[in-house]
Amino acid sequence: MSRRSHGLMAVWAEAQRQQQRREEAQRRAYAQAQRDQERQARDAERAMARLHRERQAAYRQQREADARRRTEELDARVAVLTGLLADGCRAPAFTAAALLRPEHIEEFAPGALATPVAMPDPARYQAPTGGRHLGAARRDRAQEEARARYEQDWYAAQAAERQRQNQLAAYRRQYDQWAAGALAEIRQHNAGIAELLTGLRNGDAEAAVEYFSAALYASTAWPEGFPRRVTAAYEPTARQLVLDWELPGYDVVPETKAVRYQASTDQEKETARPAAQRRALYRDVLAQSMLLVLRDLFAADTYGALDSVALNGFVDDVDPATGRPAQVYLATVMAPRSAFAALHLDRVSAVECLTDGLRGQLAARPDQRTAVRPGRLPDDAGGAGTVVSHGGETEPDLYEMDPIAFENLIAELFRAMGMQAVTTQRSGDGGVDVDALDPDPIRGGKIVVQVKRYRNTVPPTAVRDLYGTVQAEGANKGVLVTTSRFGPGAHTFANGKPLSLIAGPELVDLLGRYGLSGRLGTPAPGTATAPDTSSGTPEHNVLGMTWSGDVALDVCALVCKGTTVLSDDHFVFYNNPSTPDGSVRMRPGTAPDRAAVQVHFEGLPPDADRLVLVAAVDPETHPDADLSGFTDARIRLLDAAGEEQGQLTVSDGRRGETALVLGSFRQRPGGDWDFVIGGKGYPGGLTALVQEYGIEVA
């Protein structure tokens, strides 16, 4: 072989070796990549397993914490029951001073009306006098124009000042009239208290019953939920008060003793309180209640009116012979003042004190309504018994009240709130049931009040009629009071107008807050206080939304408790068009609406107190758009038949933001749903918005 061929073979062999080395390097790199990928997969799997364990541990800790919290609440309730008498003895004793009202009237505060209107400053109206370019004629004309502007502004200021003085005088007259009436009412009340105390000193039976009943009702010793109902009589010759007092039921003692979370079943297990322990605690609570009533009565008697108290404790039950409601007496005692004064209530065993120390009787099995025979009843005390009630069935049922009596009650409520109020004549009242005058010089003035003793939901037409009456009467404000409730349409119409809507539960709360009484009886079956299902379709509203601008938007709804969505399933949007219960559904918008949401407010979950409406730019259709073109937006509220009940204006969008909270319907204390405008925007789009409401976005 020649030298040349030998050189070529060497070159070829070297090329083959290099090729082999490259292929080997590629195989090693591929194998290394596979090993790296497998290692990363194992790392990811271990990380997911660790995250899963951490989440499981966090979930378990949360459930265990919830169980501990429930147990602590149960322990706290039992602690309140066991310490009822000791805590009650530390409460201040009732005195007659608590019945008196201070003769203090809020001072006249005219606010901005107290400041005179500023007169224009002549120095600011001087025309320019210098300059070679300004001729004499032009200077004269400029001075004349300045003088004219000054005179015009001066006369306008004078007119504004006269108007201020007239308004100030009118407010002063209103205030003086209100102050005189309020002071006269306070003095009349205090005179009545003085007359009551005189009667108490003279042994008047009615005065004694009224005074000592007030002492029991004013006591701050009773835990929330304990009944306060009394029937009382007073016998002057024996100086003895005889009364029946309602005791708490057996359910006042929690049936559950503790709560423990079981991870194996992912459930909370309740440990029942031993029956013997529960019965003993209930019996102790009844004895403490009896002693606490005696303590409140004797402590309030600074006039020597009581030599003894005959006290009977009862619970409501049903007579098995007739099936009618009946009172079952579980405790009774006749306590002389001398014997009771010798007791140290902060150290006694309540049951032994009642049965041995005071020779009273206490049912051996009060949980089974084992009755005792009362020693003396109010009807036995010379026929001087007077029923006094606070809370419970003895309060007047507002549904069954006489219409005139109901209007008088509302007028009395407004007077208790510091206003002057009178009922109108039954004919020619122009749609006004109560005329009221608020003496506040800034926000006060004439108020027209309409009352609706309804069981059905008040329609929006009634609110529109009230607004017409306010305008016709020239009133500052209109108030619509009802025993039922208002729908979203009524609140929508009232939004932004000088109107206030008071639903039944709010009315009951106001009555109690100002010392009046009233309850809402159970509505008759089939009334519109419950959702109307007679047609097979629940009552609902449609929220139709429209806006200006060409940008494509997604309209969504979140069913929340406060600022937290109930669950991911309660975030209603294009991929989840309905809540699990169907109370909120997406609907296609029909002209003029570009989007719509159907809402059954009565069917929302019990935990829900807010329905939030949001809009966001569709990132697929307009990836670079923002909400700067989102203007003239509004929400039309439609009923189930498609009739418009009102419109709500919402905030415009802003540059750089891609999601916006339009507003929220929030549940009022009375159960109605009112609208609150939104306006908060999010540059991060719908993802950033829903994360703030507690939705996790992967």
Image: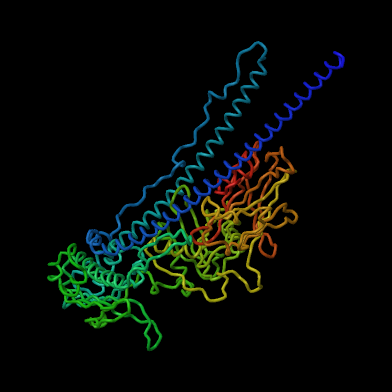
- Residue at 83% x, 16% y is 6
Q: Is residue 653 above or below residue 559?
A: above
- In this rendering, position of residue 286 left or right of residue 681: left
Q: Residue furthest top?
A: 132
Q: Position of residue 360 (x, y in %)?
A: 19, 76
- Image-quadrant location for residue 5: top right
- Image x and y of residue 444, in percent: 47, 51
The front one of 145 and 73 is 73
Q: Residue at x 41, y 45 (%)?
A: 109
Residue beneath the point at 44% across and 40% down: 114
Q: Is residue 157 above or below residue 205?
A: above
Q: Is residue 623 visible?
A: yes
Quarter holding the C terminus is top right
Residue 691 appears at what percent x and percent y? 57, 45
Kindly identify the residue that appears in the image at 56 percent across and 70 percent down. Answer: 530
Which of 666 and 605 lies nearest the eye of the viewer? 605
Quadrant (top left/top right/bottom left/bottom right) for the N terminus: top right
Residue 540 or 64: which is nearer the viewer? 64
Residue 460 showing in the rendered view = no
Quadrant of the rendered structure where residue 464 is? bottom right
In the orientation shown, which residue stands out farthest toward the front? 1
Residue 196 as seen in the image, left or right of residue 144:
left
Quick check: 655 left or right of 235? right
**Front residue of 351 and 491:** 351
- Locate residue 185 relative to residue 312 in the image: left or right: right
Colour scheme of the rendered structure: rainbow
